[in-house]
Amino acid sequence: MIFNQHKNKQRKTSLKWKWAFFTSLGVLTIVLVFSFLLFNRFTNVLLQQERMHIDNTLTTVSSRLSGYSSPLNKSDVDRYLQPSISNGDQDTTGSQSSSTSDNIYSDSLIVNFSRDNIVVNVYGVNKQQLFESRADPVKFQASEKRKIMPTKHNGKKVLVGIEPLISKKNGSLIGYAQVTDKLGDYRRTVGKLLAILAILVIISVIVAMMFAYILAAELLRPINEIQQTINDVKSDPDSDARVPALRSNDELSDLAGLLNGMLDQTKRYIDQQQQFVEDVSHELRTPVAVIQGHIEMLLRWGKDDPEVLSESLNASLQETKRMKSLVSEMLDLSRAEQIEINYGEEITNVNEVFAQVYNDFKMIHPDFTFTFDDDTSENIYVKIYRNHLEQVLVILLDNAIKYSTKRKEVHLSLSTSMATVNIAIQDFGEGISQEDMKKVFNRFYRVDKARSRDKGGNGLGLSIAHRLIEAYHGDISIESSLGYGSIFQINLPILTDMPDEKDDEIIAPDQGGDK
């Protein structure tokens, strides 16, 4: 229990921050991978450049010293690797062309030697050092051919190039040249590159987080509106608060539409429940009062009078039957208001149901004349539960018979128009005034309340029929004239993909059930 309370008190993390965090994490991963590839490629290019410097220096030294035919000594090396760069006396033993050549090599050596990171060493054939351009050389290792390799010197990575010096005159080994690149410029450049990449990563993550947070806030704005609507409805179930129309045509707008539809449906069910309770309470008040009055009368003195006793019992029984009928019709109406939940996909053959009800009423009302005009050329199918269509037809035919006092005749017709099927039921009874026609589909409404009660009506039949037809996306209307009768018309949308005749038994449910 304590753990649950502690868990509930934990501060929640906003979805915007989660979105921003994981987006930044993704951007960080991408930038790091990109930076690693860029850094690796750039450092390889820098190392390649350093190798080229070493290679060029080895070539310069080798070209300058390979003119000897005997092994090198210190004076020979000093003469060629430490030339005079002044404009003073020239070497008297050399010709003009030789002096020019010396100046060319001297310039190349000066350029290479001037690099702070380059150290040039020359060794004799006995591996004894003959020349060094700077102190702190790397330990010499002889090699039979030119090679450039990385190694460690004073705890740092350096590049070392080694080349055997071969005489151009006789091809003999006259010494060794070693060039060491301490990679100082390389490390400084790499450091700057790392700093730039680090700044790039930090800026990228910050910008990505800000952008992701702003984008998440904008994308989640509809969710905030949905949450606010839910809270409003939660605090006040009778509230008409709904999610405002969203301009974004995406999943969130679909969710908002579904939520509004659910709220409308829930509100409708709440209103229906309240209306049901109010209607039942109102309608049951009279029969309950009648029964109570008769019982009280019997308790006082009526039980000793057989005539009064019989009258009271008959009246109470009649009111009890009326209450039973009322409750049954109210339940029918309640079920009619929930059709979209229970019977949304039922398919029915209209011709078959219409013919069945027509034959049933001819049998149970032999004193009436029924005419049936079927203008359809083939079977018509509509999306409606079979028992509901039958119930509507029974309500309308009962209503026609109930109010046909003189001319006991009822006309039925079935036809199609465009994409709808039309059902018409006409009687020749009392008719309905224009004022009453606007209210005949209201609950408990009776045109002539006294006569309707005598005929056993509760004023719910037409309400049930109206609700059933509307639930299946149809419409029901009335045309009437006082003294001439009424015509009730039903229009239902026809299914375009009609099933085969052999599937009729599967499509049409069992005829038993509530009517």
Image (tube, rainbow, N blue to C red):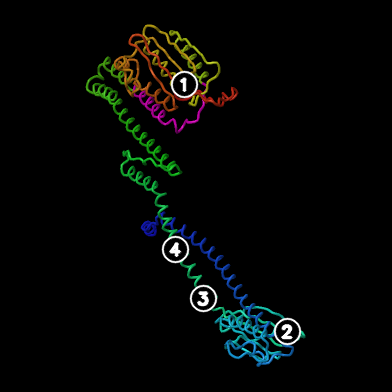
Can you tell which quarter of the image residue 459 is in?
top left
Viewed as shown, does residue 479 lie left or right of 293? right
Quadrant for the C terminus in the image? top left
**Proximity of marks 2 and 4: CB atoms separated by less than 8 Å:** no
What percent of the width, then of the height, locates residue 205? 45, 62
Can you tell which quarter of the image residue 452 is in?
top left
Viewed as shown, does residue 371 lie left or right of 96? left
Residue marked by disc 4: 203
The answer for how far apart the CA atoms under marks 1 and 3 are is 93 Å
- Residue 272 drawn above or below residue 233: above
What percent of the width, then of the height, locates residue 120? 61, 84
Asked if residue 336 lies in the magenta stretch, the reply is yes
Crowding at mark 1 (Cα within 10 Å: few <14, some 14-19, many 20+): some
Residue marked by disc 2: 166
Q: Which residues are magenta?
A: 322-349
Residue marked by disc 3: 188
Which residue type carries mark 4?
Ile
Crowding at mark 3 (Cα within 10 Å: few <14, some 14-19, many 20+): few
Dot 4 or dot 1, earlier in sequence = 4
Dot 2 or dot 3, earlier in sequence = 2
* Overall secondary structure of the magenta section: helix
Residue 390 is marked as 1
Circle 4: element type: helix
The answer for how far apart the CA atoms under marks 4 and 1 are is 73 Å
